[in-house]
Amino acid sequence: MSQSRERQRRLNRVTLEMSLKPFTNLEQMAIDEVCAEAIRQWLPLIGMADKASMLLWVADGSEILTWNGNEETEFEWARYIGFANEHCFSHIQGDDDPRIARPYRDSPVRMTYGHLGRIVSSFKRVAAEQFGVSMEVGATFDAGPEFAYSDFKYRDHPEINRAEIGGQYISLKADYTVVCTWSKLHGDGTAYAAYPNGIPEGTPFGEFLGRQCASFLPTLGFDYIWFSNGFAVSYFPWTYLGANYNGSQMPLTDYNELSTKVMSFWDDFKRECPNYRTEIRGTNFGTGMDLAKDYIPMLPLYEKGYIELPPPNSPWGALNYDFGLEMTGYLSRIAEIPGVTYPFRFYPNDPWFWQNPWRDLYDREPHDIYCPLAAARVNHAGNLEGPGIVEILTIDTEKGELNEEDAQEIISHLRRAITQAPDQPGLLTWVYPFRELHDRVAGSSEHSGSVFFHDWFIRNAINQGLPLNTVIGTDSLFRMNQDAAGKLKDTILLVSASWLTGANADYFTNYVRSGGRLLLYGAVNDSALLDLLNLKSGEALEGDFEVGHFDFSEDGLSVSQPFRSRKLRHQAQIGDGGFREQLKDANDAFTTLAVDLHQDGEVRVYAISRQHPTWGGGRVGWVRGSLPFENSGITHLPIRQEASLLDSSVVLRYMLQHFGYTVVQDKYEESSTPALMFVKRHDNAFIYTGCKKDSTVSFRLWTPEGIPVIIGQATMAGGSDAAYALDRTFHDECRVFVDQDEPGQIWCRENSPVSTRKVDPVRTITVGGLKKAAVTIYPPLWAIEEGCLDIRHDYATLEEVPWTRQGDKVFVKGISGTINISW
């Protein structure tokens, strides 16, 4: 949309995060200068929001635990580079290991609670007086050992780092531990602000922290508290393993016991500190992943009103490039939200360690801005909601630098991504059963493996290039009226079949038979769905399978390979059970078998689609799905099976071909890392967004309306999919699709909006190389409805090209040469 018509989207809040390292002088004037500089650098972003906040990374939260009410008391703060409490880290080798924490500068300032209170006050006053900005300040609590040395956690009260389940203490690692929220403190005689006579024996940690916060936060001027790195939800925030899964066995734990222990902390904390907002970072994983491994009870937290925001996207992708995990986790978190909006978090700097991702991990590439900001949730009215809060972790480096150049670069990308937020569902919309997943694990721990599979299969599929960036929660979907549900007509609903039984299965069966498009994955347990798919259920099988029928256009390889993975190894425990689905009627004319698997004479269907003429254009596809994970020891992420075994999640992307979309990649060899691609809709345009870890990967694309003609790009047309190089990070607008039989180069560019005999345009897009082409154009809807669309040959003043409208698009048929599309 033109700048004159583009309505500036307002954010609810911008949160800047910062350590105390920039404060090298604690005189009041010097404090004010640092606060002013921090705000000034980010003012263009803050200006997009109704208010701002500064989240202060003071230490590791021990400053709250040791708070005694005396502002003259000095406290330990995060003045180091490297790992504090080095005895907690097995990778630290010897006392001279350079990774051990060392002061970030000579003679860091000595910090008292009074100094901290003046810093908090200064941010609020400077923001208001110098910039007219309303600013909150948040406190932080982290459960781990790495940020600052803590006598309270590791000398005085080490018992808080032990987690008891079923009468036994559990752990994955002997060295690295975090604070366990349901632990109880031993008594001591030290005076604390909330316990002037010391801590009574057996005090619940949640009660202690809550009372301390109820004193600490108002005395020092904080407005809310942030629980970091999985604190308050998981004792195992860094690993895909947990109390319920050890990498080879699941389930291990009773749901009621573990979830009750987690909720006991919140009940205690909120009883003692009821008047302060609590925000959480969450783990590095998604809702279903967390439910399966740790029974994390997010639904009760929402229903009790303990948190009003879901956790943001994890910043872990910067460290491991697992953006499929980041996107899956983010979509699962925003599917249903406890309040009115949700946050997005970006990780440009690290004030504790050596990495500053914007420069040394992202290489100043904005993929971790554009990709997660292509995500959006659909509400019950059928409208898309983007994040209302943007958080910057952090604005200072490990050396305490406030780098203005980085801020300018990052803000420009943030503004573009936010301004071009999705306003229609993308190619696929994940139907996320937020409530149902909670109910399944609460009903039986035997469903843990199915819930585990639900999210991890989608993570793998996104990492294999599945263009999934829209989500709707089932609470929202089932509340939709007919008008709201009609807004989903142009998207394909992606749904796990394993939780669909009875009325839920009937809902989606009727959806397809009424003209809807549905892509299922996972085990099919309902007879109506089996009938819809022309499947029947047989004996459950697992183990090794040979891939038989495989009817897709596949990713291309530049080099010949001695093999192409055609063997699949399936673990029923983490794979939604064994393979049971068989073809019911091989003579059904409306069924297309895509993939089947063979084992000792038995055949199982892996991928299939069906479209019946009585369904009014409705189509259903299904991919069984499997996880290529091998049993492993203690790791952060799953270990992939050997390379000769197929990661069958790629079939989910291939299955889009049955719906008219080809999204395939050309790679050097099979082991090359696939690129990520998302299709964002904004202002009636298609914005192709994504990133490549391997910059040699390219795409071949086709849609039901032909090849995408991306603005600023050229490609070769000719009756089939077309090739696209695209950049390492891409965020490219497309409003034109071309279907022509004659081969030739098609190009598209932004042109000068020269006035025509019909309109004074604000934009002109020129498309050339057409040869008797059918052209589909998606201009802004206002341009069509207000009669401001003009299409002409060659130059803006020459022959007008006739067009017809159908809904949100217009058509030009049998056109050759060059056309200028103006509005």
Image (cartoon, helix red, strand yellow):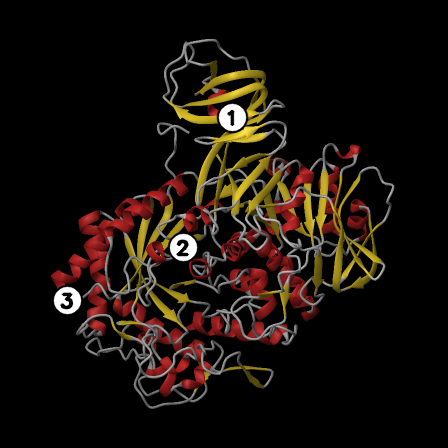
Q: Is residue 813 visible?
A: yes
The CA distance from mark 2 to mark 3 is 30 Å
Going by the image, does 598 lie left or right of 654? right
Say whether disc 2 or disc 3 marks the residue closer to the N-terminus.
3
User: In the image, is residue 463 above or below residue 119?
Assistant: above
**Label number found at residue 162:** none
The CA distance from mark 2 to mark 1 is 38 Å
Query: What is the x, y in percent for residue 77?
Result: 27, 73
Q: Is residue 467 visible?
A: no
**Label number found at residue 746:** 1
Which one is closest to the eye, mark 2 or mark 1? 1
**Label number found at residue 25:** 3
305 and 544: which is toward the camera: 544
Query: What is the x, y in percent for residue 330?
Result: 50, 54
Dots 2, 1 in contact, CB < 8 A: no
Element under label 1? strand
User: In the image, is residue 501 above or below residue 28?
Assistant: above
Which residue is denoted by mark 2 in the rendering? 345
Q: Amino acid at mark 2?
A: Arg
Query: What is the x, y in percent for residue 238?
Result: 48, 69
Say whether disc 2 or disc 1 marks the residue closer to the N-terminus.
2
Q: How many marks?
A: 3
Q: Quadrant of the C terminus?
A: top left
Q: Residue 114 falls in which quadrant of the image?
A: bottom left
Q: Quadrant of the N terminus?
A: top left
Mark 2 Cα-neighbour bin, 10 Å: few <14, some 14–19, many ≥20: many
Query: What is the x, y in percent for residue 26?
Result: 15, 67
Dots 2, 3 in contact, CB < 8 A: no
Q: Amino acid at mark 1?
A: Ile
Element under label 2? strand
